[in-house]
Amino acid sequence: MIRINKWFPEEMAEKYAETMAKKIMKKICENDSVYRSIRPEIRKAVFEDDNGEVSKPRLKRFLSVPLHELQEDKEFKDFFEAYKEGRYASDGIAEIINYSMLSDDLRHNLLASLNVSVCPYCNRQYITTWEKTADEKRTTADLDHFYPKSQYPLYALCLFNFIPSCHICNSLMKGAKTDEAVYPYAENFGDDAYFTVNGDKEDKAYCRNLLRIWRGEKDAPISVRIYVNPAADPEKKKRIDNSVRIFHLNEVYQSHEAYVRELLVKKRIYGEGAYSDTMEALFKKIELPYTACELERFLYGFCWMEGEDPERALSKLTYDIVKR
Ligand SMILES: [Zn+2]
């Protein structure tokens, strides 16, 4: 639901494409009959130059281009459809392009280079990166294939098919289906889907009830749900619905009910202005220059001016509850 704003650094993408293209070309040399068994339209689009020769630059481009850009190409759009419908299920591509060809070290270095700190699918779990040696990094991120490698073997090594995700989203939630969800390299939920709580916040009784809601009293429960804007683009709406379903977002976010209760009370109290006035006066007194964004961060723990904060867990939830 959160966009991956910083893509792979150019140097890392180049290193990856060069390393994997070499390995794939070696496979092709060793298994000419298997290579020839691959559909001619795929060989032509992915591996070969205009003279019909296997071309490293061509293959490197295929490995490193973002998939939403690849899909703009009619030929590749057709391949995606064919794999999705199972029409290409029996091709020999998995013998030439296989995820097992990616070493552990390169996988860790790749994911670490993205600097993603929170799982983009759920925005709940932190991802941690550390340096094992000067040029070797490690990360707690799982590598999720957005287009599952079992169904879309052609894309098993495409750089932008790799989503750094938490273990829960990668293994426990999704099964094998992310291909119809929101693609984190290109989009997020944004204003098209947001967290809401039951109850009319303008209603006086609701405001009087806040303290009871905060205490979690049994007759004042709250329910946290994702509201999908019916005016959103129908195709995007479908992808959002799929993300909510695949990652069980409504269910897992209900466990943050106590946090939401606190936010509602903070919003009500801070909204009166007295607390932020005091904070401003305090900042001035200690001569600490601050921006409006920093003041918000101090009050709520997040910087709202920039919208959701991809570096903090629950930032989308917090933004939606406090600012909408
Ligand atoms: Zn996750």
Image (tube, helix red, strand yellow):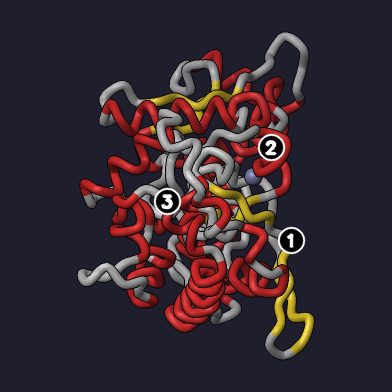
178 is higher (above) or lower (below) than 33: above
Q: Quadrant of residue 130?
A: bottom right
User: Dot 3: what SS?
Assistant: loop
Extreme residue in the bottom direction: 134
Residue hosting label 2: 259
Residue at 35 percent of width and 74 percent of height: 55
The answer to whether marks 3 and 1 mark residues whose Cβ atoms lie closer than 8 Å is no
- The label on residue 38 is 3
Crowd around label 1: few <14 · some 14–19 · many ≥20 (10 Å): some
- Which comes before the other along the chain, label 1 or label 2? 1
User: Dot 2: what SS?
Assistant: helix
Q: Is mark 1 within 8 Å of ligand 1?
A: no
Q: In the rendered structure, which amino acid carries the disc numbered 3?
A: Ile
Q: Quadrant of ligand 1?
A: top right
User: Dot 1: what SS?
Assistant: loop
Residue at 38 percent of width and 26 percent of height: 238
Q: In the rendered structure, which amino acid carries the disc numbered 1?
A: Thr
34 is higher (above) or lower (below) than 225: below
Q: Nearer the viewer, residue 109 or 129?
A: 109
Residue at 33 percent of width and 71 percent of height: 58
Name the side, left or right, on which 21 lies relative to 168.
Answer: left
Judge depth for marks 3 and 1 and give the one in front.
Answer: 3
Q: Nearer the viewer, residue 236 or 315?
A: 236
Q: In the rendered structure, which amino acid carries the disc numbered 2?
A: Tyr
Residue hosting label 1: 140
Give x and y (percent) for residue 107: 65, 67
Residue 1 visible in this rendered orientation of the protein: no
Judge depth for marks 2 and 3 and give the one in front.
Answer: 3
